[in-house]
Amino acid sequence: MPIDVDNQISEAARREGSQLRNFIRRRVANPDDVEDVLQDVFSELVESFQLVRPIEHIGPWLFRVARNRIIDLYRKRRPEVSANAPVDDEEGSEVEFQDLLPSPDVGPEAALAREALIDELDTALAELPREQREVFIANELEGRSFADLSKESGVKINTLLSRKRYAVLSLRERLRGLYDEFTKG
């Protein structure tokens, strides 16, 4: 690579690196994943320069790529999260999460709706503060008890309950429009 390109990449890393790491850290719980996402973002920057694709505004571009990599990370992990974990429906009955989604077997529209719901849920989860996201995923999707979470983390059960409550409220608000679109459409 020409020296000017090396300087541009080094300058972008110096200028945006710490803010970018903090941006990723607020959305990704595992420190190793934070570093992997950060490395992927800068690798894509280098690759973009190697392919001679000009980037006018490197800062916003880096954050857009980071957001996409975070979404990819959650999509990759989707199989680890059980879609058959029991959840409470509106009547308080326990049903499997999978049963709340449109069946992909019904047809292409249902498959598209299902994928849109899952993508939107992934994005909404990624936008939650780390503590809320972690307790929501651990309790709702992985089926772990608050007692176990408290023992493991050293955080009081009431604090964990509060974090989950805020996560649920945030997710409800964030996903309400999509829910209304599918139920009225």
Image: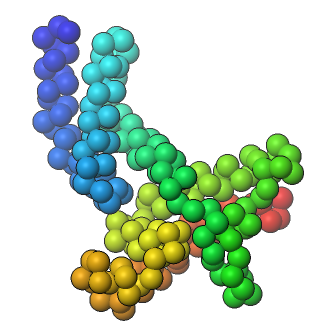
In which image quadrant can residue 163 be found?
bottom left
Query: How many numbered circles does the render carry?
Result: 0
The answer, for residue 8, to whether it is visible in the render is: yes
Seen from this angle, which residue lies furthest bottom?
158
Task: Give the left or right position of residue 124, taking residue 89 as reference.
Answer: left
Q: Residue furthest right?
A: 106
Against 146, is 77 above or below?
Answer: above
Q: Is residue 66 left or right of residue 102?
A: left
Q: Nearer the viewer, residue 168 or 104?
A: 104
Give the answer, above or below, for where 100 lies relative to 53: below
Q: In the picture shown, does residue 57 fall above or below 117?
A: above
Determine whether 151 is above or below 136 in the image: below
Q: Position of residue 146 (x, y in %)?
A: 41, 84
**Picture coordinates of residue 105 (x, y %)?**
83, 49
Q: Is residue 173 visible?
A: no
Color theme of the render: rainbow
Q: Is residue 135 left or right of residue 20?
A: right
Q: Where does the C terminus fall, quadrant-wise?
A: bottom right
Quarter of the image with the N terminus in it: top left
Q: Position of residue 30 (x, y in %)?
A: 30, 56
The residue shown at (86%, 51%) is: 106
Q: Quadrant of residue 86?
A: bottom right
Residue 169 place in picture, x, y as percent: 52, 78
Which residue is more in the foreground, 142 or 107?
142
The residue lying at 51 percent from left, 47 percent from top is: 75
Residue at image position (44%, 57%) is 126
Residue shown at 13%/20% (left/top)? 7
